[in-house]
Amino acid sequence: MASSGPFPLVLEGPWDADPPKQLCNKLQRYFQSPRISGGGECDLKKQTGQHGLLLLFKQEEVRQRVLKRENHELELPGQEKLKLTVRLPPAKNENKISEKPVTTEVKVSGDQDTKHPLERRSAQAEGNSEDARTISSLVVFNNVHHAIREDFLTLLVENISGFSEINGDFTIEILPEAQAAVITFLKTIGKKVKDLKISASTLEMTRTILVEDLPPGVNEIFISLFFENPHNGGGPVTMVQYFPNDNSALVEFETHEVIDTLLTKKLLFNNSPISVYPYYPTLKSALYGKAKPLVKLPDPLTVPMEPYILKFLQKGDQVIDEITSTMERCFCELTWPQPNCEEPEIILSPSDSLVSQGRTKRNTIKTWNQDISKTFSDLMSEYQVNTYKVDPLVWEAIRDSIENEGILTEFDEHQETVIRVGRLEDMQGTELQVKTQIERATQKIGREKQTIKEKLIVCPRRFSILHNKLEETLHKEHKDVEVTYEALTKSICLSGLATDVYKAKSKILEKLQSLVQKYLHIPPQIVQFLQQVNCETFSESLFSADKISAIYEVEGEAILLVGSSPQVLSEAEEHIQKALDYKCIDVVDSEILNDCQWKTLIDSLNKKYSSSSKTMIIEEQNTDTGVKIMIAGCVSPVCESYQLLCEFIEKNTKVQKFVAVISLAVIEYMKVENEQIWHSLRMKKVKIDFKTHVNERGILLSGPKEEVMRGVAMVKKTRNSVHVKKVSIDEPGVKVFSKTKKNCIQGKQNKSLIVLFWLQENGDEGNGGSIDGQKVHCKITLESGILLTVQEGDLTQFSADVVVNAANEDLNHCGGLAAALSEAAGPELQRECSQIVQQQGKISPGSAVVSGAGQLPYQQVIHAVGPRWREEHAQSCVQLLKNAITMSLLIAGFHGHQSIAIPALGSGIFGFPLKDCAEAIVLSIKTKFQDPSNKQSLKMIHLVDSSEERVQAFSEAVRKNFGDLSPGNKSAFGMQSENQDTKLRKEDTCGKVLASIKTTEGLSILLLKGDIQNAETDIIVNSISLDFPLNGALSQAILKKAGPSLQEELNTVRNRIEMKIGSVLLTSGCNLNCIFVLHAVIPPWDEGKGDSQKIMEDIIRECLETPEILSLTTVTFPAIGTGLANFPKAIFAELILSQVFKFSSTRPCKTLKEVRILLHPRDQENIKVMFPFSLENFCGLQKLKQKSVWSMPFRTLFHVVFYILNISWVSVVHVLYSLFFFFLSTASKPHGNFIITQGGNLKCKKIIHVLGHKDIKETVSSVLQECEKMKSKSVSLPAIGTGQAKQDPVVVAKKIIDSVEDFAWKGSAQSVKKVKVVILPELLEVFYDSMKRREASPKMFISLIKHNFALGKKIKSTIFQICGESEENVESTASWIQDLTLKEQESYLSSDELIQNFGEKEFKELNTLQKSLNIIISPRNNFCLQATGLAKDVLKATKTIEDMIRRACLRREEDSKAEQLSHFIQWQYNQNGVFLSFDKITNFYLEKAREEKKNTVDIKIKNKSCTVNFHTNIATDTNGHSFPVQRITKSEDVIPTHWANMKEQNLLLVELKPDQQEYMIVQNNFNKTCSNYYIEKIERIQNKSLWSSYETIRKNMNNQNYRTDNERFLFFGTKADSLLKINNNGFNHNYIRNKYGKKIYFTVSAFFAASDDHSPPDRYGQKFIYYARVLTGDYTRGTYPYFDFPPQKIQNPNVQYDSITDDLQKPNIFVICQEHHSYPEYLITFRK
């Protein structure tokens, strides 16, 4: 029975008695690994008291394997290997067994077993069974390619078998030739390694050996005998194969056991050691094991080469590369000889690839020499060298013809041999051809020695005629004659035998003599074409296709036709007329010729038709009328080129079209919302410019005509679809609020509403007083058409093409305007100016230079250097300034700018007087542009400055120097004329406006003078006849500008429809400045007997309807029919005007805005007829006919005439009759109950005609408001209603003055400064009395007028323009904006009687407050000021007004004290020996300083400052003059006898005792209504100064009222903190507030005064009430809101009531306005 475990081993190593657990774990894993340590399952335990560890194995054989290992090592990471020792433990109860420990390593050390694997296998197999010997322990791996390394196979075998190569369990040998590897095992392995596609199988038991290192001289018999000798370990041999070259042999035995014995022997053959290896036929290789023999590579071979083949091969690298690559595959490297080597040899060397990665290709090495020699020889056999014996002349003749890229051809001059080298197939393919050419060339050269040459000079073109027939004839008759033509010498060359050559020459001369010729008459354009083309080639191409034997020759300007016969000439002439043509194109826009696309098109056409032979020419020709494009040549190219060029010109001609848009809001809306349209236009190279100038507002499209015209239609359609609404809000601060809250407003909008808000600024709409946000002081159009404006603005932000900078000589922008412009422009401006000075030097005064604008909003900046002012050289300075301005204008025009901004040049630091500066600048402009015929690019000149003073100087200079202009221009300085909005966009491009009017429906009619072909409009009306459509002068003028395409288009329309009299045909505008042209077939005038007038009316109506259908805005009529049709000019004038008015009144115009009647400047007769028949007069007649205004009888229509500005009085009747017809012609649309007309010959600008006079006050108010809207400064009016209406003059005067007063009170008067009432002498006294009574009006109104305070400043309406895609969206948005802005409005009312005492200082402060804040301060009466506006500004204004009231209160208290003091103290000063009293305030300040015990005090005496010294009583002024002052004490009034002793005090409070009668009287009166209150004390107030003032006033009142019962005892409740003020200063309105305003009120009963509202308890619960003396005097009942006491009598308004009460019968409350009319007699302290 087998013994049971465990089986122990002692393990020792370099550790202490207690090794760490981690180490123990690693040791246990090591001995559990069969592969690493040979161990197996075991446990590791520590031995108590001993150094070693105990290994316990479960199996004995495992322990034995561990013991057999020679060396055990444990590898620890990062440390040296740990040497381990294992041994058996000592037996129990026996002596120790002495065993020598065996030490082995996990990995085999460097010394390897040198035995052959088969030897070791044989030894290891000894003890195996008989069956085991028949099984091979060798395994072969097939398909082992060269990339698989030996170490990889080692790992693979170890993983599969579990054996270790290091431990000698197996060996590997790789056989490269067989792509196999043999593994020798102790036992067989039969498994396939599928993943690597390597198949594994056992290797057969071999019976063959490979014997190497045999000595020389042996043979197969000798070898067989040696290995059959048993002493050598051999046996029976079946076969021997001997390899003498390698000294090796293969020996096959009968059995494989012999091999095992031989492999263990060390054999000597003839005393020479030999090597024996097992050989495996299946592998065709022996297994050498670790002792592989050294491999010897073959020696290099040297092979001679044919020199010419080498030269051929070296001609290109590709052939050598192919040969080298082929040889490398045979393990051979080539060493090529040097070029031009006499005896070239190539060296063939074995390559290193024969031995790669230890895998020797032995079989290949054995046969390498033979294989390489054969391979190289085969390669060289592919190339061949041929030689030919050739004469040098023959070689020169054939050298070019036998050249071949794939063959090397050379000629050896010494041997006269041609050598050809190339590939065998190329050489064989060309050999016959080469031999043939050599033979022919040899024969030819032999003949040439017997031939002659003759030359016959013949023109190439004539030779071309003879060529065909001549060649045929000569070939038949003289076939051996060679005929050639030399173009260089222009001669026919004949070569051949002499007899044949001379005969041929004679034949040619005969043919030349038979040619006929003719001069042609063709257009000069075709002649020009023929002059430029090659006559030879073009003649051939022109006539050869039709087989016409003819040519042409150019002789100067004539064309000579040459042919073989007259018939041929006729055919040739006819052919030229059909084949050649020319076209001309008039180019209007010459800039198109510089377009790169135009040049590309021209180049492409020239290239297309001139590539091989020129068939067309295109030339630009400058003529008097402009540039022409001439196209001449063959018909087809000319027509095609003409069409392409015309299309390009039509498409790309640059035009500008302006679409007027009145509102900036619409422009902005279209700009934002129609981005897709703008993008599409830009993609078509159309430039879009949004014009916002006040005189040019709209959208300007520039670019190709075709695209611009389409764009105009789209823009107009878009513009007409926009819904616009103006929302005007007449509240202060709305504009500021809208700007600050713009983002908020936009953010709160419903995103579904596509709308745009536009806050209308000054000048946003047509006739505003600003341009681009700048304030315009005046503007005027010069005779040359240039707009001159004077504006107040910032030049760093102004809008113009170029600006003039006030520069110095060094262009160093260091101050003034130059510094501001430089800062805004950025550093680029100064840098460029410095470069200008560096290049040109300093700029002299009177000169100017131009530079870029940097970041300024201009295209360029003109730096004008003005003179420094010197009074003694004033005239020279003025001239230099004019030169600088003139130079600036010239530079602006030279650079093509249209607008320029000019400041007051030199008026700053250069010291030029402002008036002279402005005068010189304006005169320079006038001199430069006074000639209307002087064409300039400039359209606008702006005189701009930020200083109002300089702007005013500019305005005065413009008025002074341009006062001789027409009245129409003078209106630019004041109010714009009524019809200014009907002006043309650019008057200078459309014509001069003679007259204009707008119909009631809004259609503008303009009468202009100008050329119809230059008109800029949407539609032009043209008159044509039935037979000759474009034959008249008008049609010819239009056709000349439009171009021939207009005629072609009209012909197309005529062919499409039937044309008759009265027809109106529509074509495009072509090159005209319009979109369409309407061609009307005008009937001839039949003197009114037929239908000609009716047909003309229909034509005009159809021409007016067409722009409405096409959604266009303007149509222009010339005087159609007044030419060839003979229509009377007066008849045409009446027809055109009547039809336009009829059209306007019968149908609303949706798109048509302007109808223009254009008269030719030289058509003076038409102008004379039309101009008196003016639009305005015609309009008046139409209105009179329609009776739209005068439907009532004339006697009931009352005219009241208002003369605006300063005019003298005239009779109303005279005005009505003298201006009746003028009124009819200039009357505008009725404004409510009045109509406004121009002033005509009167000295006023406008007349307001009032219809009816129901309410005079309302009529005058509405007229004053209208005057304010028109910004009139003065207005004159009559005494309305005092005539036929027979109204009371007193009432009329009162109502007129009331209206004017209300107009002023409401703050409406901003522009209107003067109102004149023109009355008849008999009404003078009535109006005078009424105005005298107004003098007694409240102080407030008088003070306001005196101090020129704006009564509620003019509210400038904030106008929102809302644009949207639908009316519903616009309306909802308008409502939303109104609600939003009105919510921000706030109003506050400040009322106080002290307001009426406001002086100049306060009103200036209020004026400043209104200007600085977004508010309106409006007086409501003498005592009230109302602040209205934005809430935050109203709050600020309210605080300021309250502060002003408090200051007024302090002044009033001061005045009161001064008044009291003046009764008993008087300071006086000595003047000329007489003492004069100081005024009350100075008197008060002197006394106050004395009481404060000051030494001195500063005062004023008659506005002179003086210092008073109280010690000396001397006053000294600033000049040192001194004079005495004195203090006078007046006799004091008698104080009440019951008062207590004052003891030199002014104020004393005496507490009364309850038993005093005085106490009981006060108590009883208090308890009448306040018996439930408890009185703590009653004090008597003893104030001498207050009592003195009160007594004085009481006496005066008694005397004034003629009675003594003016005094009452009344109650006054107050709070604790007011007691000291009242005791010292008396009662003041600031202590109370009630429904009667800020007055002093008292009550009859104590109950009302004792309430908590009037007498609030203090913190101790005490309440206070005064029992006071009050001078009620004469009183009346007061009603709310009575802020001032009424006068007692109307006849004497200065005498007012002393007080007011709530009830005359049973008064309970008394109100006084003067604080000294009361005295606080008793103070009652009480509590509940």
Image (cartoon, rainbow, N blue to C red):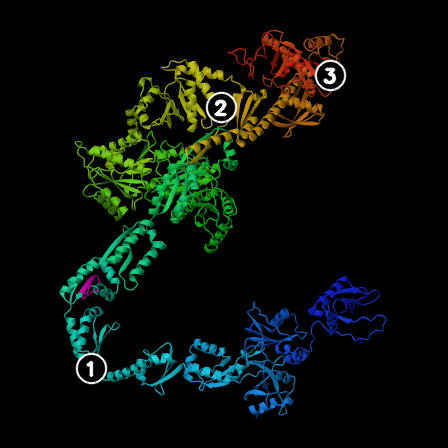
Viewer-nearest of labels 1 and 3?
1
Residue located 48% across and 16% down the image: 1332
Q: Are the two marked residues, 1 and 3, in contact with CB atoms closer than 8 angstroms?
A: no
In the displayed structure image, the side of residue 1517 where residue 511 appears, left or right? left
Q: Is residue 993 above or below residue 388?
A: above
Residue count near mark 1 (Cα–Cα under 10 Å), binned few <14, some 14–19, many ≥20: some
Query: In front: 892, or 309?
Result: 309
x and y percentages locating residue 1203 in the rendered image: 38, 24
Secondary element at image label 2: loop
User: Mark number for residue 1548?
Assistant: 3
Secondary element at image label 1: loop
Q: Is residue 554 above or below residue 1694?
A: below
x and y percentages locating residue 995 in the rendered image: 31, 34
Residue located 26% across and 36% down the image: 1102
Return the residue at label 1.
Answer: 497
Residue count near mark 2 (Cα–Cα under 10 Å), binned few <14, some 14–19, many ≥20: some
Q: Main secondary structure of the magenta part?
A: strand
Would you identify the image quadrant in which residue 236 lies? Answer: bottom right
Among numbered discs 3 and 2, the one appearing first in the sequence: 2
Three-letter code for the amino acid on which mark 1 is drawn: Leu
Would you identify the image quadrant in which residue 1141 lies? Answer: top left
Which image quadrant: the N terminus?
bottom right
Q: Which residues are magenta?
A: 546-561
1721 inside magenta stretch: no
Return the residue at label 2.
Answer: 1306
Three-letter code for the amino acid on which mark 2 is drawn: Lys
Query: In front: 1713, or 1386?
Result: 1386
555 inside magenta stretch: yes
Query: In front: 1013, or 677?
Result: 677
x and y percentages locating residue 772 in the rendered image: 44, 39
